Structures are given as C-alpha cells and as structure tokens.
Amino acid sequence: MGFLDTLLGRTKPVQPNLDVLFQLPSAAVTLEAATGFTPTGTGSVCFRPVEGRAFADVEQDVRELLDLSGAKSGSLPVEVTRDSYGFTWLVSSHLSTELEDLVTDLHAVNSALADNGFGPQLLCTLIAFRDDAQRRLALVYLFKRGTFYPFAPLPGERRDSALELQVKGVLEGDLKIEQDLSRWFPVWGAPGL
Amino acid sequence: MVARTRYAPDRGLTVRMGLTMFLLGLVFVAFVAAIIGISVVLKASDGAIIFFAVVLGGGLAIGSLFYSDKIALSTAGAQLVTPQQAPQLHGIVDRVCALADMPKPRVAISPTDLPNAFATGRNTKNSVLCVTDGLQRRLTPEELEGVIAHELSHVAHKDVMVMTVASFLAIIAGLMIRFAFYGELFGGGGRRGGNNSNGNQGALPILLIIMGVSIVVYAISFLLIRLLSRYRELAADRSGALLTGQPSALASALQKVSGSIARIPTKDLRAAEPLNAFFFVPALSPQRQAQSVLSNLLSTHPPLEKRLAQLAKISQQLGQR
C-alpha cells in the first residue's frame, strides 16, 4: 500500500494470486518421496461471502460448474459448508490419484470468483494429505501472499509443529513456502481435512 | 488481464481528509511564522520559551507514539491473550489478517463490561488489538469480525501515527499557552518589580501576544484534529466493510454497541474517556451528542446515522451485478 493511500485512509482490497496452484502436483510427488504423505483427493476453497445478490449468484454458478464437471468424470458432487467464523468452504472430492483434476477444479472456483470481482474475498485453498499412520496434513495456499504453508492438526486443537517444519524443509524447492511463521494460522476443523 | 475490482474509492472523503490535513499544516506554518515574527519584530529574548515548548512537545509526541500500546493497554486494564486462551478471537483476527494480507497484531482482552474495541501502536508490527469482554458477549461472530476489521483498518491506515503528528501542533500551542502564562506570572512580574530600567519593558506584551496567538492556534487545530479523527473513522468503517464484504454486520454491531453504551453507568465511562480517540465508538452516549452542532464539532467519532448511511451505500454497491 502506498504512502498516500495510508495517509488518506483508503486501503484497497488485495487481489489474489491464482496460478501458483498448478505447482501442487509435482510438489506432491516430492512430498510422498520424502515423507510418505499422499494426497487424499480432497481439497477445498475457503472464502468470505459478500452480502447481496451479486455474490449469491456467482456462488450458485460456481457450484453448478463444479457439479457439471464432477458428473462428467464420475466424482462426488461438491460439498458446501459454512464454518463458525462465517466463511464458506467448497469441498471438492476426487480419487487420490486425480490431483491434477482436483487442482483444476479448485482453480476454476478461484478464477470464477476473481473474474466477477470477488478475488479479495478468497482466504485460502487447502489440499489434504495423509500417511500410512493416518496422520493428517494439509497444504494451505494463501491467496494474498502467493505462498503455501503446512498445517498438521493433532487431536485436541494442537499442531504437530515438528511435522510442519519437516514438510517446510522438504517442499522448499518445489513451492514458495511462507517464511513468516506468524502467518501460518491454524484452520481447525477445516472441511475435507 | 487486470482483475475486475468492486472497490470504489470514495473521492469525496479522500478530498475532505486531504483538505483537513492541508489546513492543519497551514495553521502550523502560520503559527511558527507568527511566533518568529513577534520575536524578531519586538527583538525579544523569549526564544527560550519557544525552544522549550518545541522540545518538550516533541518529546511528549514521540513518547506517546512509542508507548501508545502500553499506555492504552494499562489504561484499559487489558491483558494480552494467547491463541490457547482465546481461540475464537484469535481465529477471527487470523482470518481478517489473511484476507487483508497484513501482519497479525498482538491480541488483548479488557475485562470490562463496556462493549468496545481499540487498536493502537505506532506501526503495523507493533500494534495491539484489544476488545472488551462486554463486546464479545454482546456481538455475534460476524459482528465481532466487522468490528475487528474496522480496528485493523485503523492499523493499516497508521492512524496512531497520523493523529499523533496531527496533534503535535496542538501540544506545542498548549505548552506555549502554559509557559507564557507562568512566564508572565513569575518571570515578567519579578523582572518588573526588580529592575525597571533594564529594557525589559517589552516582555509583558510579548508574552501576552504569544499567549493570544497560541490560544487561537490551539482552538483551530483542536477542531481540525477532531474533524480529521471523524474522517479517519469513516475511512476505517469503509475499509473494514469492504474487507469482510459484510457492511451490514458492521452496521448492526455499531447499532448494538452504541445502544448499550448509553445504558452503562457513568463511573466506567469516566475511566474510559482518555481512550476515546482510539475506541470503536466513543464512550459517551451518541444519542445525547447528536443533539447539538457544537458537540458534533467536538466529537472524535462521526454520528451514528452518518456511519450507518455510509455502510448502507457500500452494501448497495457490493450487491450490484
């Protein structure tokens, strides 16, 4: 934000960075080789709904679009949930081998919102992973920063920080990992994780 | 391709705010010129007064800038809380910060029943966001999020810095009034009684003139600072509403909070008054204030109706296809 914008108190909403998502499939290969975590095939997009008709219409369009592409490939329909913070999660479920399709779906949601002027409402995209011991891990993509961070929840709202830092080290070459650890905010109870 | 944006800047507000700051600067320059002019024309040796006022005023301003977070927290009796102590509150702040792409401030809770919130700190890295117990109890999560987005917009706009710089002039003018007053009481009086033939005849009128000029400058800059504060509030409402996309939630929070503040006993109110400029709503009944033009001119926050009207307009803009 520029000096003048600060002085005059006119913050502009931040536009998201969308295309980085397509780096995920190759990063997933690296992750599996190093740690044994594989994609579950589930991913979600989290955004803050805007009041009024315009946003409701766009949201409806996005849902129909995803259901249509889902019906073609035979995957499950998208699931829509509202979390306790008032954010909407669109969950797309594919087979665990179809990470490319999942990323394409998620990208479609993101670009549909951004093209209609609701890009600043996008919070994060989340891709779920799991290892043989059934430990859970998510890669969270922060739209506004254009960076990823790992999130590994343990029962009782605790985080497996050691695992998160390990994943950070593994993926540093493949993805732009968020370096400011204070931005790694927890997404407890995120749908699809 | 440039992404489509629904962000519509409010040019009127920007122009009015710019004009207010320009006028403040103008008054400052006129004040300095007047003081220097008086001293030079009358060949006075009262430079010490001016020097002390500027040094002390500068010290006060820098001190309040650097310690604003600590001062505000201790005045409000607030405690910093960890994510474990207040998971819901931290969750909201995390999300709003991620939407706005700004660093997360420290989070504090003040154990009073007065429903209010403030954010302070000289820059985004050193900022503190504080909400009261009363606010958390009265508002829904969406409304609380609206209030937090409003406060974080204050942080993003560096309002503590802007208002401190704006108040610098008033601080100096206020100190000059005081110095000139005491100078006349003790210094001037002593000199007059002790030694009349020493060419010090000019001392009394000069002090009086300096005091007069300072009083005028103080009054004008005080009104301009209050005007600026009201514009900053409107700007924060606006940015906060656009950030969450829910102007109506913020409007409903405003309505709830100003309604219940009017019913809180006065003992709490007096304790909270020094913090008014950084509060979400002033800790005085807006219903009472809205009555007279004078109290509108002196208030740090715009009247409730004006804030609600702006939010309604934003809601309409967001709903357009």
Image (tube, coloured by chain):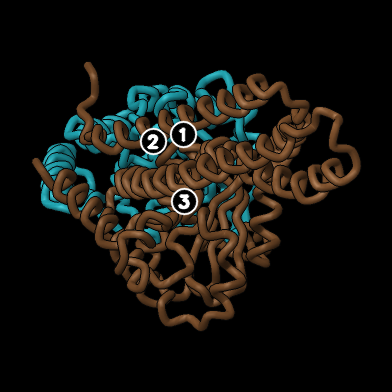
Image spot of residue A76 (x, y percent) = 23, 49
| Label 3 sits on residue | B151
Residue toward you, B93 or B17: B17
Mark 1: which amino acid?
A: Leu
* Chain of residue at mark 1: B
Q: Residue at x 42, y 56 (%)?
A: B298
Q: Earlier in the sequence, mark 1 or mark 3?
A: 1
Q: Which chain is brown?
A: B
Q: Is residue A20 above or below residue B157?
A: above
Q: Are marks 1 and 3 in contact (CB under 8 Å)?
A: no
Q: Is residue B273 above or below residue A95?
A: below
What distance separates the C-alpha of mark 1 from that of mark 3? 25 Å
* SS label for mark 2: helix
Q: Which mark is residue B24?
A: 1
Q: Colour of chain A?
A: cyan
Image spot of residue B311 (x, y percent) = 25, 53
| Label 2 sits on residue | B20
Q: Do the residues at discs 2 and 3 belong to one chain?
A: yes
Q: Do the residues at discs 2 and 1 belong to one chain?
A: yes
The reply, left or right, for residue B178 in relation to residue A33 is right
Q: Residue at x 29, y 66 (%)?
A: B252
What distance separates the C-alpha of mark 2 from that of mark 1? 6 Å
10 Å crowding of disc 1: few (<14), some (14-19), many (20+): many
Mark 2: which amino acid?
A: Thr
